[in-house]
Image (cartoon, grey):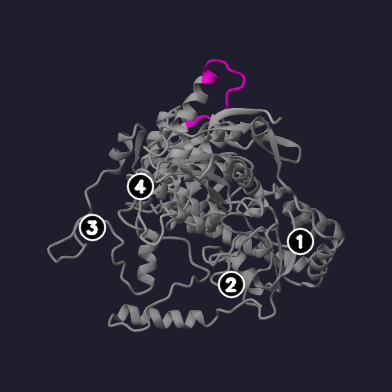
């Protein structure tokens, strides 16, 4: 007879999750570091009770107590961002659970789910749901649909989740959670996993099989390259005269940075990087040429325009990477893609190598032993990179008065932060400047979320990253005033947990990125500056008189106001020395200057307009778009 234990569904969830482990290359670790969440009527008496019981059992010294620490966040979206940031920093081998109540608490997590799935990082979401019995139907916060009673707002998670389920009966928990673990630990299929938890089912007791709660290790695969695929890619590389590698996040997630550096050194193939792949090759490697695409530098983009073969490794080829399919301009360009996901490997009609990046690079290094690009091509790559390094120096040391450009802040941080420290950013003009300028020395140092480019990510992400890296490394989140106003409240969570991070808060009284884009597309920065409504009826009055420094202090952080770059450098040293979370507040110039643009981004312009600025922008748009093509 199968041995069973009587638990509520919520208690069974906690007990099961606490005993799940991941393993890769012989290194085993807990899959879930803990649970972020906010309790409401949907989960306070279900998952809330289960987490409380587990915590008290652990404090009482019970050796069988589930180890799933709970952290109270201030916003459910922030909780998911923190979990995603943790998973990203852990190379997708560990993550957090996030629980919410029903209704608005659940839908707050939808944006975070989309971010995790777009970035292909694992998070487990447990949104509470309506009553299965329907006795109190409609329950508080329930969205009713006259077409069917079998729907709730949690159905909105389906398109943004890699796996979705609803637990309508206790028996369903076993296959559901097993499939959830399968997806979370699959490097090709991972993303947000959503298991909806009806509030009455959470509290329902059931005799679960004891075997369900045994320690279970999920082995994270390294798909080996199929020999014929490997040979085809090697043959294509040998035939190329001007090959270029585009290193994406998959290089870092697979731990393939050293293999990439060895491959580039041996073959003399230049390596450009995407936002997710920055740091996969150290910036001072002789074959490193920096960021590629819409926000890349002139070195990588010049080589991209000339390349006859693009070798994409672990990249999903976003429109920024391809400059909206204009940057790879050689009419004879071909692609060879290495990716664990066939969907990405097949992009641009590429020669496919569906495999783990590390194993593929090691295999190619062997296949291409004795072969390299010619010396003149390598010298050209080094020369172009050297020229771009001079541009970086100019951007980092502009000595702007009276307000510094944000690139000067980045320069100070790049010079002050250690190789193992982590810089965080996500949205606005800053990721573009960082991709073009940041000199990443290690794969861990650069943490920019740009697949979803979600404003509000940076503050909670610092929480997740700090939990991932520990106390011996500085975690620095760069936050613009626009992003800050969207999700600042997780500073209180950081303070509550006694975690030390550094926030760099840049105030420029507007949306720098969208403002510049608006101006370039003929829309005259409309609606992009923080101005009070004037007597003209437009938002063109004085600056909105908010005090973001005071607001940051109100969440419990120490705040140091920095007047200029010299004071910023001095205050950064104070923040490093402190054991408390510190916000470095500095005003910067809304209008830059930013790094020189070296590629295009497709943002359509109105085809007809009464505005002269729009008419001019449309003419420019048509001219730029002429270079756009499908890569076939």
Q: Residue at x 77, y 72 (%)?
A: 240
> What whole-number distance in Å separates the C-alpha atoms at marks 3 and 1?
52 Å
Secondary element under disc 4, as helix, strand or loop, is: loop
The answer to which quarter of the image holds residue 316 is bottom right
Direction right: furthest residue: 370
Does label 3 or label 1 sit earlier along the sequence?
1
The Cα atoms of the two marked residues, 2 and 4, are separated by: 56 Å
Q: Position of residue 261 (x, y in %)?
A: 73, 52
The quarter in which the C terminus is drawn is bottom right
Q: Work out which residue is located at the far top of the displayed protein and give it.
A: 60
Quarter the N terminus occupies: top right
Numbered circle sitting on residue 327: 2
Location of residue 132 by image quarter? top left
Residue 466 x/y as whole percent? 52, 36
- Image-based side of 490 in relation to 394, left or right: left
Which numbered marker is on residue 531? Answer: 3
| Front position among marks 3 and 4 | 4
Number of numbered discs visible in the structure rendering: 4
Residue neighbourhood size for the residue with mark 2, other residues' Cα within 10 Å, grouped as few (<14), some (14–19), many (≥20): many
User: Residue 590, located in which quarter of the rendered image?
Assistant: bottom left
Q: Which of the marked residues, 4 or 1, is nearer the chain's N terminus?
A: 4
Task: Name the residue at 79% across, 60% down.
Answer: 267
Classify mark 1: helix, strand or loop. loop
How much space separates mark 1 and mark 2, taking CA atoms?
A: 21 Å
Query: Magenta segment: does it hold 193?
Result: no
Crowd around label 3: few <14 · some 14–19 · many ≥20 (10 Å): some
Q: Which residue is mark 4?
A: 137
Mark closest to the chain's N terminus, 2 or 4 = 4
User: What's drawn in magenta, residue-wise?
Assistant: 57-70
Tell me, yes or no, whether the two marked residues, 2 and 4, touch with CB atoms within 8 Å: no
The reply, left or right, for residue 35 in relation to residue 138 is right
Nearer the N terminus, badge 1 or badge 2? Answer: 1
């Amino acid at each position: 007879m199968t041995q069973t234990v009587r638990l509520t569904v919520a208690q069974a969830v906690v007990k099961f999750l606490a005993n799940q482990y991941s393993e890769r290359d012989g290194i085993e670790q807990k899959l879930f570091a803990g649970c972020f969440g906010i309790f409401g009527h949907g989960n306070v008496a279900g998952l809330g009770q289960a987490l409380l019981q587990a915590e008290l059992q652990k404090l009482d010294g019970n050796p069988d107590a589930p180890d799933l620490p709970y952290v109270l966040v201030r916003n459910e979206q922030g909780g998911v961002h923190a979990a995603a940031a943790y998973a990203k920093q852990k190379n997708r081998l560990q993550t957090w659970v996030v629980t919410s109540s029903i209704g608005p608490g659940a839908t707050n997590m939808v944006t975070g789910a989309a971010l995790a799935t777009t970035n292909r990082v694992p998070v487990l979401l447990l949104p509470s749901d309506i009553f299965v019995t329907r006795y109190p139907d409609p329950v508080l916060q329930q969205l009713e649909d006259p077409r069917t009673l079998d729907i709730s707002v949690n159905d909105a998670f389906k398109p943004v989740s890699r796996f979705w389920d609803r637990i309508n009966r206790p028996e369903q928990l076993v296959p559901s959670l097993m499939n959830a673990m399968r997806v979370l630990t699959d490097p090709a299929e991972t993303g947000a996993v959503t298991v909806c938890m009806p509030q009455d089912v959470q509290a329902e007791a059931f005799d679960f099989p004891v075997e369900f709660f045994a320690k279970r290790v999920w082995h994270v695969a390294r798909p080996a390259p199929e020999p014929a695929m490997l040979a085809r890619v090697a043959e294509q590389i040998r035939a190329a005269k001007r090959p270029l590698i585009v290193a994406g996040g998959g290089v870092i997630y697979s731990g393939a940075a050293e293999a990439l550096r060895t491959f580039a050194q041996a073959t003399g193939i230049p390596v450009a990087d995407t936002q997710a792949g920055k740091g996969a090759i150290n910036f001072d490697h002789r074959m490193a040429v920096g960021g590629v695409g819409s926000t890349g530098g002139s070195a990588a983009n010049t080589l991209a325009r000339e390349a006859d073969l693009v070798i994409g490794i672990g990249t999903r080829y976003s429109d920024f990477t391809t400059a909206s399919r204009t940057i790879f301009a050689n009419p004879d360009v071909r692609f060879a893609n290495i990716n664990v996901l066939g969907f990405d490997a097949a992009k641009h009609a590429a020669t496919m190598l569906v495999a783990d990046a590390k194993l593929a690079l090691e295999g190619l290094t062997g296949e291409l032993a004795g072969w390299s690009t010619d010396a003149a091509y390598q010298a050209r790559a080094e020369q172009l990179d050297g020229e771009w390094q001079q541009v970086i120096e100019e951007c980092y040391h502009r000595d702007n008065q009276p307000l510094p450009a944000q690139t000067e802040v980045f320069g100070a941080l790049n010079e002050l932060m250690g190789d193992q420290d982590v810089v965080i950013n996500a949205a606005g003009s800053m990721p573009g400047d960082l991709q073009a300028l940041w000199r990443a020395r290690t794969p861990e140092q650069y943490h920019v979320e740009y697949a979803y480019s979600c404003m509000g990510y940076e503050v909670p992400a610092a929480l997740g990253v700090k939990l991932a890296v520990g106390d011996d490394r500085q975690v620095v989140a760069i936050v613009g005033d626009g992003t800050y106003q969207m999700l600042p409240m997780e500073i209180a969570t950081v303070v509550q947990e006694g975690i030390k991070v550094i926030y760099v808060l840049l105030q420029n009284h507007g949306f720098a990125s969208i403002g510049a884009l608006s101006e370039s597309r003929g829309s005259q920065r409309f609606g992009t500056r923080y101005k009070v409504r004037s007597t003209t009826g437009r938002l063109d009055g004085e600056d909105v008189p908010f005090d973001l420094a005071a607001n940051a202090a109100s969440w419990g952080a120490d705040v140091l106001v920095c007047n200029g770059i010299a004071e910023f450098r001095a205050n950064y040293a104070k923040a490093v020395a402190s054991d408390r979370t510190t916000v470095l507040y500095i005003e910067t110039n809304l209008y830059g200057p930013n790094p020189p643009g070296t590629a295009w981004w497709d943002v359509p312009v109105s085809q007809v307009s009464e505005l002269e600025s729009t008419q001019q922008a449309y003419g420019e748009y048509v001219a730029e778009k002429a270079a756009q093509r499908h890569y076939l």
